[in-house]
Image (cartoon, grey):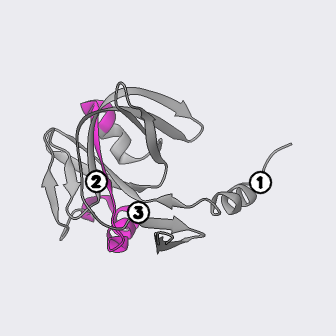
Amino acid sequence: MSVAPEDFKLALRQWTSGISIVTAENDGEHHGMTVSAFGSVSLAPPLISVCLAADARVVELVTASRRFAVSVLASHQAEISDRFATYPDEGRFEGQGFVEGADGCRLIEGALAHIECNVYSAHEAGDHVVLIGRVQHCSAAEGVPLLYFGGGYGVFQPQP
């Protein structure tokens, strides 16, 4: 029995996730995209995972450079999430605050966390690639995360 794509998407919309921007650089070319499929894998060694559409431009840059970065977005950064999800490839960084990471990947200013990685492994998975990154540098800031649920953005409200 096959699951209809519409049913699968509807079910996945019930999962609340944080929003991150994955960026890559190779020979001076920068690219980035919004992702919600990001998570920790291992503490020793420090590993994370991200899932990217196999045909995304950022995958080509990661494949060539063997490195990428993740910026975990704060609650005030919904416009940045939209920009990196929908803008044409060449316009995503225009007018956007960023800093260069230690390995050359752009990091989104004001994000709650920055994680810079070398590719540990890559796995084809349907129409996506699962990248496992070995963390080389990371930092964290105080703030409230940007969340995605049911096709829209929200913020985390801690329970008293």
Location of residue 5 in the rendering, given as x and y in whole percent from the top left corner: 71, 55
Q: CA distance from mark 3 to mark 1?
A: 24 Å
Question: Tag 3, which secondary structure?
Answer: helix
Q: Give the mark, 1 or 2, whose residue is nearer the N terminus.
A: 1
- Horizontal arrangement in the rendering, residue 159 relative to residue 26 (left or right): right
List the residue tagged with mark 2: 113
- Horizontal arrangement in the rendering, residue 92 relative to residue 51 (left or right): left
List the residue tagged with mark 3: 85
Q: What label does residue 4 carry, if any?
A: 1
Q: Amino acid at mark 2?
A: Ala
Location of residue 135 in the rendering, given as x and y in whole percent from the top left corner: 29, 34
- Horizontal arrangement in the rendering, residue 19 relative to residue 26 (left or right): right
Give 1 or 98, whichever is nearer the viewer: 98
Question: Tag 2, which secondary structure?
Answer: strand
Q: Amino acid at mark 1?
A: Ala
**Who's the residue at 65% across and 63% down the image?**
14
Q: Give the mark, 3 or 1, whose residue is nearer the N terminus.
A: 1
Q: Please identify the quarter of the rendering in which residue 15 is found.
A: bottom right
Whether residue 132 is visible, yes or no, is yes
Region of the chain picked out in magenta, as a range = 62-91
Q: Residues within 10 Å of mark 2 (few under 14, many from 20)?
A: many
Q: CA distance from mark 3 to mark 2?
A: 19 Å
**Who's the residue at 48% across and 37% down the image?**
129
